Image (cartoon, rainbow, N blue to C red):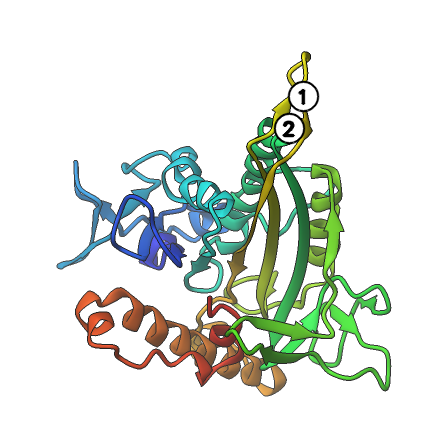
Amino acid sequence: MEASAASPPAVAVTAAAAAAEDCCVKVAVHIRPLIGDEKVQGCEDCVTVVPGKPQVQIGAHSFTFDHVYGSTGTPPSAMFEECVAPLVDGLFQGYNATVLAYGQTGSGKTYTMGTNLKDGYQTGIIPQVMNALFSRIETLKHQTEFQLQVSFIEILKEEVRDLLDPTSSSKADSPSGNTGKVTVPGKPPIQIRESSNGVITLAGSTEVSVSTLKEMAACLEQGSLSRATGSTNMNNQSSRSHAIFTITLEQMRKLNPVVSGDGNPIETMNEDYLCAKLHLVDLAGSERAKRTGSDGLRFKEGVHINKGLLALGNVISALGDEKKRKEGVHVPYRDSKLTRLLQV
């Protein structure tokens, strides 16, 4: 018997700094329920949650995480408040952070992240981040000025593609069977650059200024429709690229304000500037060519996907080992464009 929960998506959260806890990398596993096709095929759950512990068992093997959601573990509705909300709070304190979904193809990463936003239907982590972000801005707008920018890119076969580029058009069917972007001929490719102070930027990518929740949701929806997808034996709508939705929050705090009678600040004596980024990443699914039935160009896509995921695993391993961090171990950010872009 094959079980859909054999490779549940893991939601990893990384922060450049943590206010209350020392660990900079946390991992939560989300066990999705069986879908209709799997029930018809007679599949059964093979993941058992250990009662009272963030631990799962698969056969004779046990795996421990920071959190376990779904099945008999913590309800998935608690995932945002426990894992992601603290990172949104840290964004307002000037801390960079990354949330990413990793797992086998078809395990529910895009659903968990909410990257497939359509027709205003909001589910998943990214829409919840947007709601929390604008709710917090609303409460602080009288003492702080905010500017928000969003970018949405995908990495397909180690090429960076801009999902918000207005000069690109959607394409229903590419030679490889993907739904993706058609780039204007002659336009230079997007390049990864590092400034003198170590900030990673994308030269040539679109960064959209937004001021409302509706505008940010429109950017997410636009990029979602343009992302490269394809069909495999394991997933009819498989994401063939790593998608990164980045929110940049700039804030100018007004210190020592002079307040008028109605409670609104009318003069500021000093100002404090902060800028931070939150990367929300929906990774392409890890896969085996034998199980997905991939060949030709689809097989080559799978090779690039797995190479990027291997590089990401090596980076997370280096960051998650406290002893190695103290020894100043090399973190291999440059091994792939995915890890280079997520370097904060």
Residue 289 shows in this picture: no
Residue drawn where x is 58% and y is 27% of the image: 139
Mark 1 and mark 2 in contact? Answer it, CB < 8 Å: yes
| Disc marking residue 142 | 2
- Residue 160 sits in quarter: bottom right
Quadrant placement of the N terminus: bottom left
147 versus 24 height, above or below:
above
Element type where label 2 sits in the image? loop
Residue drawn where x is 47% and y is 56% of the image: 96
Residue drawn where x is 40% and y is 59% of the image: 16
75 versus 321 height, above or below:
above
Judged by depth in the image, the label closer to the viewer, 1 or 2, is 1
* Residue 220 left/right relative to 242: right
- Residue 211 sits in quarter: top right
User: According to the image, label 1 marks what residue?
Assistant: 264
Q: Position of residue 4 (x, y in %)?
A: 39, 54
Which residue is nearer to you in this view: 203 or 145? 145
* Residue 1 left/right relative to 105: left
Which residue is nearer to you in this view: 33 or 139? 139
